[in-house]
């Protein structure tokens, strides 16, 4: 009956989120997670790579290109056409919007910030320890 289906939907969604979507999300780097969240914020795909880069606040599409390629290599997204990207799994955008919205990931940065921290950490090491 319909009431039974509605009661089962919540626990089934939670199990799917935990056992399927969350494990896929965990495979992405912080920058990749931001890219996935930016995609989801745009609604339903496919997404223009340029729009994803803008939404994720990369300085240029080319800056987001390596992140996009890593996600493709990991099987999390694919390119259905030149300049486009989409999730490989149905309903992943919904999961991202529910559990990992872009606003919750916006503070995580990659690239120069991480590199700068690494240089500062190395500078703090005693000479000859690198």
Image (cartoon, rainbow, N blue to C red):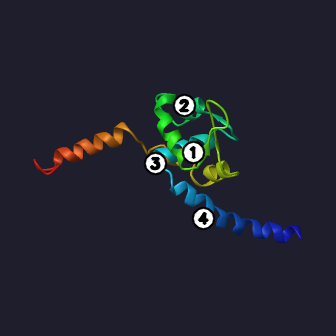
Q: Residue at x 34, y 43 (%)?
A: 114
Residue matched to label 1: 37
- Please tell me whether residue 47 is drawn above or below residue 108 in the rendered image: above
Q: CA distance from mark 3 to mark 2?
A: 17 Å
Q: Residue at x 31, y 41 (%)?
A: 115
Q: Please tell me which of labels 1 and 4 falls first in the chain.
A: 4
In the depicted view, which residue is nearer to us: 51 or 103? 51
Density class for disc 2 (Cα within 10 Å; few <14, some 14-19, many ≥20) is: some
In terms of secondary structure, where does tag 2 sit? helix
Q: CA distance from mark 4 to mark 3?
A: 19 Å
Where the N terminus falls, by quadrant? bottom right
Residue matched to label 2: 54
In terms of secondary structure, where does tag 1 sit? helix
Query: Residue 18, labelled with which disc?
Result: 4
Density class for disc 1 (Cα within 10 Å; few <14, some 14-19, many ≥20) is: many
Relative placement, left or right, of 117 versus 123 is: right
In the depicted view, which residue is nearer to us: 35 or 104? 35
Residue matched to label 3: 30
In terms of secondary structure, where does tag 3 sit? helix
Q: Residue at x 48, y 43 (%)?
A: 106
- Please tell me whether residue 3 is drawn above or below residue 70 in the rendered image: below
Q: Position of residue 26 (x, y in %)?
A: 51, 57
Q: Decide: marks 1, 4 in contact (CB < 8 A)?
A: no
């Amino acid at each position: 009956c319909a009431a039974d289906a509605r009661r089962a939907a919540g626990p089934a969604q939670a199990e799917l989120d935990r056992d399927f979507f969350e494990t896929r999300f965990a495979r992405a780097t912080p920058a990749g997670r931001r890219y996935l969240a930016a995609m989801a914020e745009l609604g339903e795909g496919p997404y223009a790579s340029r729009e994803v880069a803008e939404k994720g606040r990369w300085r240029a599409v080319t800056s987001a290109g390596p992140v996009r390629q890593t996600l493709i290599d990991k099987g999390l997204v694919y390119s259905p056409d030149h300049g486009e990207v989409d999730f490989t799994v149905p309903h992943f955008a919904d999961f991202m919007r529910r559990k990992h919205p872009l606003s919750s990931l916006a503070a995580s940065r990659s690239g120069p910030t991480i590199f700068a921290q690494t240089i500062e950490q190395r500078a703090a090491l005693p000479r000859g320890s690198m």
